Amino acid sequence: MTILKKSVDGATPKAERQAGPFRLVFRDGLAASAVAFLVFVTLCAVFGPILIGDLATTPNFRARNQEPFDLSMGAAYFLGADTLGRSLLARLVVGARNTLGIAAAAVIVSLMLGGILGLIAGYSRGRLSGLILRLADVIMSFPSLLLALIVLYSLGPSITTLILVLAITRIPIYLRTMRAEVLEVRERMFVSAATALGANHRRIVFRHIAPMVIPTMLTIGAIDFATVVLAESSLSFLGLGIQSPQFTWGSMVATGRGYLATAWWVAFWPGLMILLTTLSLNILSTWWRTYSDPHQRWRLELTRRLQRRIQR
Amino acid sequence: MFKFVFRRSTQSIGAIIALLVLVFFLARLTGDPAYLYLPLDSTDAQRQAFNALHGYDDPIYVQFFRYLGDLTQLDFGMALSRNRPAMEVALEAFPETLKLAAIAMALALVAALVVGSLAAARPGGLFDRLATTSSLAGASAPDFWVAIVAILIFAVSLGVLPTSGTGTALHWVMPIGVLMLRPFGLLTQVVRGSMVGVLSQPYIKTARAKGVGRRRIIFVHALRNALLPVITVAGDLTASLVNGAVVVETIFGWPGIGKLMIDAIVQRDFALIQSTILITAIAIFLMNILIDLIYAAVDPRIRHQQA
Amino acid sequence: MNTPQPLLTVENLTVDFHAASGAFRAVDDVTFHVDSGETLVILGESGSGKSVSASAVMGLIDTPPGEIVSGRISYRGTDVTRMSEDKRLAFNGSKVAIIFQDPLSHLNPVYTVGWQLAETYEVHGKARGAEARRLSIEALRRVGIPDPESRIDWYPHQFSGGQRQRIMIGMAIALGPELLIADEPTTALDVSVQAQILDLLKELQREEGLAIVMITHDLEVAANMADRVIVMNAGKIVEQGIAKDVFADPQHAYTKRLMSALPDEADYRDGKSSGESEPILEVRDLSKTFLLSPGLLRPPKSLRAVDSVNFDLKAGETLGIVGESGSGKSTIAKMLLRLTDATSGEALFHGKDIFRMNPKELMKFRRRVQMVFQDPFSSMNPRMSVFSIISEPWSIHSDILEKSRWRERVIELLGLVGLRAEHADRFPHQFSGGQRQRIAIARALACDPELIICDEAVSALDVSIQMQIIDLLADLRDRLGLAYIFITHDLPIVRGFADRILVMQSGQTVELQRTEEIFRRPQRPYTQMLINASPRPKWEQSNAAHA
């Protein structure tokens, strides 16, 4: 009995079934409506333009400055029409495709570029890493809108430059996240284990590090989508984003700005769509943060009634 | 600590120089200024004379070195569109933006600290849900649209506030309201999130075990810890506040540096573009150093990092 | 010992935690009492409900998600679960105080320790300002913080782990409580520091007549402190009684299982296999210096993590490297695996310096030397199946085994380490700690190595599993003729396993001897301290003076 030994700890934790995110999200009314709205907008953006044909671009002089909530012209003019009598509902649907499509493309481009640069910066510790970080600092420390304005103005506005500019201003987010994640993962024991087994850099990066960091990057991308939608809208509003005859919600607000006193709805609806889209995305990302924090998750898992009963 | 600030300073100065180089070359890509400044029927000879006068006919690298040379003598060039020294024009507009941004930021910060802390005190409660939703809406709203809707309601329909310009106190209401919206939304989120996180930290349990009351725990033990991420985000927001200023100044006709910058870009006024950007960059750089110092004052672990 | 009224009684306490999957009963109908001046140890695994019971006494359970379903906790006859908020605040700290595991996270990082100590006096209205400061300095002196007059203005991160726990204790006893709850207070500490903290607690108990409720998973600590013991499992008390009786003659099946995990006195291994053969590894003057804060103006400070270490290793031999945290033992492992470079010195593997190998030689070396790391949770990629983990060496060194035979060989290796064929397609998180370490050993065996370096390979495991893994390693050594370098902070564990032991402290060799010599005739005070630092049962202590 002289040498008593340590630790009776470490029984295998019971494999508890966790409620999946899909079931939980519908318990929260706000988060559920956000999901519903985003699904609806996405469906509109994908299939809407096929259904409505060229309604969005056809002038209809009988419907000029048609007021909203008036069904006399048919359901297509429910939200009113602009000064040329084009259905705002149809224009919103087409605008959804452009707005979401540009934002999605920008997110993908910045995610890939930022991801690769961040991977290099995190994995190599040399001069290159420092240079990449300084580049991110330059982009970060300068107002993204101004940088975008200058680039767009000098290269000339087109959808490609617009996507590129939006992507460049968001690169630092991905770059820094990726770098921090890689720095953390590369210190993990299994990376050391692989090195000691003789694994080369390519194997370590693609087999061990990349699978660990990609989920985080995708989450950041989803959250950043809202920011990109807002940035694109601002640029298009200032006239440096999308150019007519194409339009996004942002440029629709700019068009309507001139008719505020006579036809408020022309500027109002597209802005509201932007607000609802970004709000839904932000509600979901807040919800996701609570869900993925083990300290906070119970707030989503317990019904309100139970929480109130326990609280004394 | 001083080393930390020193390192940050050298980095930022490097960043500013890189930015100036970038802007110099990009601005020259926007096209020939002679077309904008001379009458439409001007001849090629007139345009060449104009370009020769301002040195735009030299190879671009010659122009660049001349620009750098002038910079060392604090000569920032003439603003073609106004026929005045560019820096003078920029420095005139800058305080207008600074006043606007400082007031908006201060209001947003105070409101966020109060609303965020109260929301975190009872997570899931009615106030929390209201605060979370409204701050999310603030962070999500497109500022140009809010500005337009505000004009529609308060200027066009009700007629209680002026549409644009400066002068009376009423002129400040809408620009500040719109400008503080996004910082308020983001900061409230950060304050609440960081406060909720801090309140679940082990040292809060220690304080409760010591017999420290709830209010003292929130405002003495937790708040100072919760401030750290708030300071970081507030620093990051400085740059995005300028974004907001550009939009707000454009819509409300505010004679600040944001509006000046847009005008300069549209008018291909190279010297003015460079001067406004230099001033903005320096302001952001000073702001970053200030943020670092505040951070170190709040968190002793940063202070001792180099010790 | 039987006072008419106990200090604290807990009756039929039941606590639930709610989650989507339903309510989890953390504490189930628990009843116990604490008398003045005694030490009650609550012994149990993590998740046994031992900490939750203590938190309930202090009113520290968050409701929701927790819920105190039923029960009564009374302190000198007053029910504390129904106290008003004000009464609770006055009670906490002054009557009952608590200290926790991991003192760094339990101290507020942005305030000085003096501020936090003085606050204890101030919120209870005992003293303020200069007087509170004076009392705080006294409290620090009391718990053995050197130079308390200047240290009082330090922040928690500037102290060592042991000192932080002393500060926590000082803060807990500041108002002279009658009961101190100590929740795993020595868990993350080195053995020598652990012994000091336990001694401090006993000393304070003697002087102040303090009752202590000690919560621990560590049988040695339990035996060292306890007058009475409560054994908890899955929220229930399974056994309680006088400490000596429970340890010597456990009644409940669960307690018996716990106690049987204590290892027997094993025979020393006498290094018979390592007689005359040439050493496979010769380490000469191995040193590693880390540069700290390369200053711009100040001369850079450096830390000599490993300082001129020398040893040999023969084929089939096991060398134990023993030291506390910061002794440089893990740095040696990293250097020998070429995960970090040596600052100076050489390590000859079959006569070739591993620090000067060209890439081709290094690849060959990596096949012959393998490793098993401390934490089996993090040493395997969570997204790879067991099959891909074990077969990874073959995809790196493509000439070892042709792909068609991989599955067969993986199953063979799994069998060798005591796992089954169907485990090959599962993922690491589906295994317990001990099973994961077996997978890590199987991976190490995949390229038929000569030497396996084990860095704290069993310290994350519980005691019965520790012995199983060491038995497995010993068995493999005899069957496959492996040599081991076995790095650990726990000297007793290598007693029956290592041929020779290298004791290290602050990067330097303290002693390198045959195992039996180390235990029977330790030459250096530090080695003696390590051997004696393991806490001894209270009933065997010569000066067993208690209330």
Image: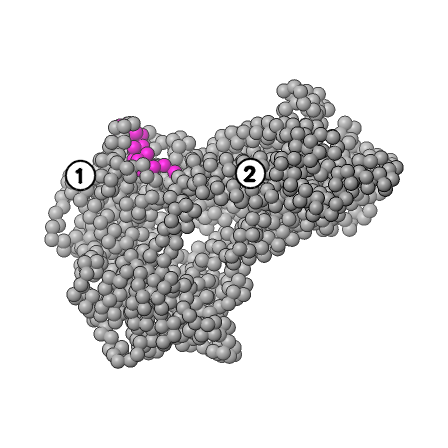
- The answer to whether B33 is drawn above or below residue C394 in the figure is above
User: As drawn, is C379 to the left or to the right of B171?
Assistant: left
Q: Which mark is residue B235?
A: none
Q: Quarter of the image containing the N terminus of chain B?
A: top left
Q: Is residue B103 visible?
A: yes
For image coordinates 31% across by 56% down, the residue present is C325
Q: Position of residue B19 (x, y in %)?
A: 62, 44
For image coordinates 72% across by 35% down, the residue present is B264
For image coordinates 73% across by 44% down, the residue present is B28
Residue indicated by mark 2:
B285
Any magenta on residue A301?
no
Residue indicated by mark 1:
C208
Q: How dense is the environment of label 1, judged by Cα within 10 Å: few (below 14), some, or many (20 and up)?
A: some
Residue B95 sits in quarter: top right
> Element type at marker 1?
helix
Q: Which residues are magenta?
A: C110-127
